[in-house]
Image: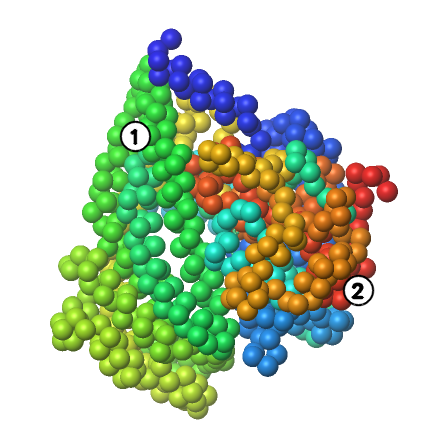
């Protein structure tokens, strides 16, 4: 046997030994692919109990929450549990300094006190179906990509019209395995979702950015909402006449806790992974993409941090924006480090060498797949020309400067006025007004102005000059590269910084406001940058990306054909998935052993009175001192807080239930540990761990800290281990 082959087999065998973990599986294929392994890990349910179209199953209790998170129904009256950070922007928007639900916590005492949330929705999956054959009908191998895509879209449109559904249900069709397979989803979306309760933010986001993505962790990251339906239990827009939704299934809650080795299942809507990319893509992530994005956010976050520490009002206004920017920023750093520590590029290269050996030894494969890696390599080289400029320009043009984001939104209204006239604009002025009210409630021009100054300095030095708009170069030259001066002039001269004035104008005459926007200097600069980005960056990058997508689809097919001993899961794409593993600690670095469970004692160790990240309410300290844990303490008398498991998760899995061997709720997924944050690109079962809140901590906080016993009474508490 050749040395390379031997090495490959060794790697494959070790991977098999530590099996639990890798994969985000399709609920409807569990029986074929996973059930046996799951039972081997301790599961007592069947695949049918998890996902079934014929009877109620766990999936009927799972929702996609607000599009980016997961939630689960935990009572017969539509009570939904999700993370604090998933509800954060809602909680914050209901808060003011005098009525600060964000800081102080909130518990609705009755249905009447539950707070509506404009735009918030939850979606249930009714069923899913493999529709690959229909979608790929008339799609030929050699078709150019746009033709192929056109045919696919036509087939999908036909399917959506002909698929069986009730009038209140929606149909969607999504690609899997890079477009080698397609699945259809029948869904139900509820749009009256009310805020029921949350602990004080000092508990719900305890440890903030310092602890984010890190184990050991001590965060009570949960919040409660309720789904409302019409009198027939169907989806309905918000109405005071709506009633609590009655789910087909809700999760019972186990009071028996977890121990290392217990089976765990995480059921939710993971957003995006890229587990099958070539080595060159990982290399570009490490060398270009992540460093660029991090550099931009370093500066934005630096400005925010100073301002937020100095002023309580600003802290409340910026906390949600800051958390969103900081979350990905920190993850990108962890991802780079993790890829490097794992030697991911070199390991992918070994894998590719083995792939190539097998392909070349097989005439048919050689003909079909022989060049795919070389071509991918070449296209990524083409991409490299634009990559740095593209990352900086997109990050700066669309995600960090608020005035730019405002301009991007307003440009939609400018288009309405220009193309459809005044009446059309007036028809949307309610939306415009609502949007602007929300924007200005939390906007501080002096902060955004500093962000602008910092980021434009970066923009001028990192983006290729021929990929910028002339107006940016002219203005930078005019101010002699004094970015503070440039910012000061631009922000003073822009009426977009005068929220009171803007709102006033929209109320009186929206068309005058929009005309003024068009002439606004900040608006014009923002548009120029965004338009050049679209023309000179997004277009060529998109063209190359389309080629890469085609090759990646082929490479995906090839990997699945060539590595017959390997079991493949489709990359996450915001559709419903099952991850499973066990409660498990880890040894992430030499000499370090992470315990799988943390306790309230650890919260008290980290507790720093008055600190912005590590303070807690006095009442929590009191409850701790009195050991007043109610029926929620662990067998050792301590209050459990968080635990880790070997479930493969990603962004979007936040709020996903952690479920025990029998189908009961034991925790709430909310994060991953630092050493394993590269798991979207390169999963290492020895090091990658997901982090969950222990459900007993949630119950303790609702009951003992929040005094909301009426919510506990709605739930179904069980003792599966002791058989009570
Ligand atoms: N890292 C977790 C996730 O990706 C939790 C984020 C919430 N915490 C925060 N500081 N932003 O969403
Ligand atoms: N915290 C993430 C989320 O919000 C979960 C993760 O990335 O592990 O979905």
In the foreground, 61 or 205:
205
Q: Which residue is mark 1?
A: 373
User: Would you identify the image quadrant in which residue 561 lies?
Assistant: top left
Q: Position of residue 22 (x, y in %)?
A: 52, 34
Q: Is residue 633 left or right of residue 124?
A: right
Quarter of the picture containing the N terminus is: top left
Nearer the observer: mark 2 or 1; the answer is 2
As helix, strand or loop, the secondary structure at mark 1 comes to helix
Q: Position of residue 321 (x, y in %)?
A: 45, 66
Residue lying furthest top: 1
Residue 355 is left or right of residue 114, and the answer is left
Q: Is residue 551 above or below residue 334?
A: above
Q: Which mark is residue 710?
A: 2
- Which residue is at a point 28% across and 44% down the rendered structure image? 287
> Of 477 and 606, which appears nearest the observer?
606
Which structural element holds mark 2? Answer: helix
Q: Residue at x 59, y 42 (%)?
A: 644
Q: Nearer the viewer, residue 304 or 269?
A: 304
Q: How many C-alpha atoms fall within 10 Å of the one at disc 2: few (<14), some, or many (≥20)? A: few
Residue 205 position (above or below residue 590): below
Q: Answer above or below: position of 388 versus 402.
A: above
Quarter of the image holding residue 439? bottom left
Q: Which residue is pictured at 49% across the width and 20% down the height?
A: 13
């Amino acid at each position: 046997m050749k040395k390379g082959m031997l090495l490959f087999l060794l790697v494959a065998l070790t991977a098999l030994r530590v099996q639990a973990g890798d994969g985000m599986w399709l609920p409807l294929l569990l029986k074929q692919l996973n059930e046996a392994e799951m039972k081997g890990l301790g599961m007592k349910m069947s695949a049918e109990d998890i996902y079934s179209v014929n009877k109620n199953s766990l999936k009927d209790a799972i929702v996609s929450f607000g599009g980016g998170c997961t939630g689960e129904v935990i009572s017969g009256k539509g009570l939904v549990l999700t993370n604090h950070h998933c509800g954060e922007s809602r909680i914050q928007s209901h808060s003011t300094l005098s009525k600060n639900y964000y800081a102080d916590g909130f518990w609705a005492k009755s249905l009447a006190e539950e707070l509506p949330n404009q735009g918030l929705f939850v979606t249930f999956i009714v069923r899913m179906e493999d529709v690959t054959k229909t979608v790929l009908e008339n799609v030929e191998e050699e078709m150019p990509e746009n033709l192929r895509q056109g045919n696919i879209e036509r087939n999908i449109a036909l399917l959506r019209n002909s698929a069986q559904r009730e009038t209140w249900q929606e149909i969607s069709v999504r690609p899997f395995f890079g477009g080698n397979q397609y699945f259809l989803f029948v869904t139900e979306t509820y749009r009256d979702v009310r805020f029921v309760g949350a602990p004080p933010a000092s508990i719900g986001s305890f440890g903030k950015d310092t602890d984010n993505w890190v184990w050991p962790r001590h965060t009570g990251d949960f919040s409660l909402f309720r789904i409302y339906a019409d009198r027939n239990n169907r989806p309905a827009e918000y109405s005071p006449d709506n009633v609590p939704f009655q789910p087909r299934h809700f999760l019972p809650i186990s009071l028996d806790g977890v121990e290392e080795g217990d089976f765990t299942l995480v059921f939710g809507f993971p957003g995006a992974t890229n587990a099958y990319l070539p080595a060159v893509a990982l290399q570009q992530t490490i060398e270009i993409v992540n460093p660029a994005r991090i550099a931009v956010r370093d500066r934005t976050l630096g400005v925010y941090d100073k301002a937020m520490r100095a002023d309580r009002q600003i802290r409340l206004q910026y906390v949600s924006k800051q958390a969103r920017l900081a979350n990905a920023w920190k993850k990108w750093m962890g991802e780079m480090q993790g890829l490097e520590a794992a030697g991911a590029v070199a390991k992918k290269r070994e894998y590719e060498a083995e792939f190539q050996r097998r392909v070349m030894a097989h005439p048919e494969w050689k003909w079909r797949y022989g060049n795919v890696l070389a071509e991918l390599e070449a296209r990524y080289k083409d991409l490299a020309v634009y990559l740095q400029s593209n990352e900086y320009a997109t990050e700066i043009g669309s995600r960090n400067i608020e005035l730019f984001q405002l301009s991007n939104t307003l440009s939609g209204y400018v288009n309405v006025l220009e193309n459809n006239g005044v009446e059309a604009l007036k028809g949307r002025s309610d939306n415009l007004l609502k949007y602007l009210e929300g924007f200005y409630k939390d906007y501080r021009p002096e902060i955004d102005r500093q962000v602008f100054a910092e980021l434009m300095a970066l923009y001028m030095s990192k983006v290729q000059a021929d990929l910028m708009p002339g107006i940016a170069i002219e203005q930078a030259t005019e101010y002699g590269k004094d970015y503070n001066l440039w910012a000061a002039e631009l922000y003073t001269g822009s009426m977009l910084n005068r929220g009171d004035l803007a709102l006033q104008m929209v109320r009186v005459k929206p068309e005058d406001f929009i005309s003024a926007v068009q002439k606004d200097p900040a608006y014009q600069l923002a548009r120029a940058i965004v338009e050049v980005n679209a023309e000179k960056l997004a277009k060529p990058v998109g063209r190359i990306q389309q080629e890469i997508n085609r090759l990646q689809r082929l490479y995906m097919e090839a990997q699945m054909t060539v590595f017959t001993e390997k079991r493949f899961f489709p990359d996450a794409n915001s559709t419903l998935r099952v991850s499973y593993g066990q409660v498990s600690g880890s040894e992430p670095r030499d000499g370090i052993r992470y315990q799988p469970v943390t306790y309230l004692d650890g919260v008290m160790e980290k507790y720093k009175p008055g600190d912005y990240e590590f303070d807690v309410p006095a009442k929590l300290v009191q409850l701790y001192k009195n050991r007043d844990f109610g029926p929620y303490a662990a067998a050792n008398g301590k209050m459990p807080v968080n635990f880790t498991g070997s479930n493969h998760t990603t962004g979007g899995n936040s709020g996903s239930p952690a479920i025990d061997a029998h189908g009961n709720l034991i925790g709430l997924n909310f994060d991953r540990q630092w050493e394993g944050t590269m798991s979207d690109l390169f999963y290492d079962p020895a090091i990658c761990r997901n982090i969950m809140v222990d459900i007993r901590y949630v119950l303790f906080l609702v009951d003992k800290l929040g005094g909301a016993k009426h919510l506990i009474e709605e739930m179904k508490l069980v003792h599966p281990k002791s058989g009570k």
